Image: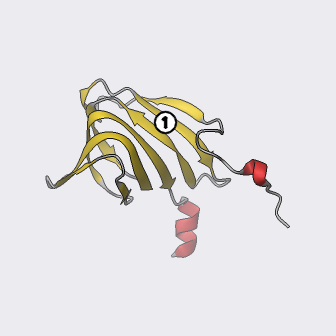
Amino acid sequence: MSNKSVSDIVIFGESEGDVRQVKKGPDRWLAGELAITNTRMFESADGAFTSGIWESTPGKFIAVYEEDEFYHMLEGEVVIADEDGGERTFHPGDTIVVPAGFVGTWDVKLPTKKFYAHYLPRADQEAADD
């Protein structure tokens, strides 16, 4: 029998999240105002899986992915570029996965809002898998 009930289900738009302002340091911030808000709606017991809503005003920053990220864009426009100069533009309705290890830039062209789900393997889990 599970110790979880229907009241433990997180419902986006109804459940309360942990709202945090995200600050990009001078080593990552490239342009714009970058007022970023991350509303974490769920975190697994081991901290390896999180999901929520991410919002940003226009600006550009360096993105370094330690986690795998699934995201579904709700509003805005973003150009993601890799270190080799390849780039793609994403709009509302686009759903993508950015793999852990990706390094590049995010250029937020229009105020953007996305649903995200992150998976960050724990170091001891990776060691157990070797």
Q: Where is residue 13 in the image (x, y as percent from the top left)?
A: 59, 39
Q: In this view, does 35 lie above or below 86?
A: above
Q: Position of residue 21 (x, y in %)?
A: 47, 28
Q: Position of residue 17 (x, y in %)?
A: 61, 36
Q: Which residue is at the far front? A: 93
Q: Which residue is at the far top? A: 33
Picture quarter containing residue 99? bottom left
Q: Which residue is at the far bottom? A: 130
Residue at 58%, 72% (x, y): give it. Answer: 128
- 110 on left or right of 10: left
Q: In this view, does 105 lie above or below 122?
A: above
- 41 on left or right of 69: right
Residue at 58%, 63% (x, y): give it. Answer: 124
Image color mode: secondary structure
Q: Which residue is at the far right? A: 1
Instruction: Check disc 1 and report its element: helix, strand or loop.
Output: strand
- 62 on left or right of 49: left
Badge 1 density bin: few <14, some 14–19, many ≥20, Cα 10 Å = many
Q: Position of residue 27 (x, y in %)?
A: 28, 34
* Front residue of 75 and 63: 75
Q: How many labels does the image show?
A: 1
Residue at 41%, 51% (x, y): give it. Answer: 72
Quadrant placement of the N terminus: bottom right
Amino acid beneath label 1: Asn
Q: Is residue 3 above or below residue 126?
A: above
Picture quarter containing residue 96? bottom left
Q: Mark 1 points at which residue?
A: 38
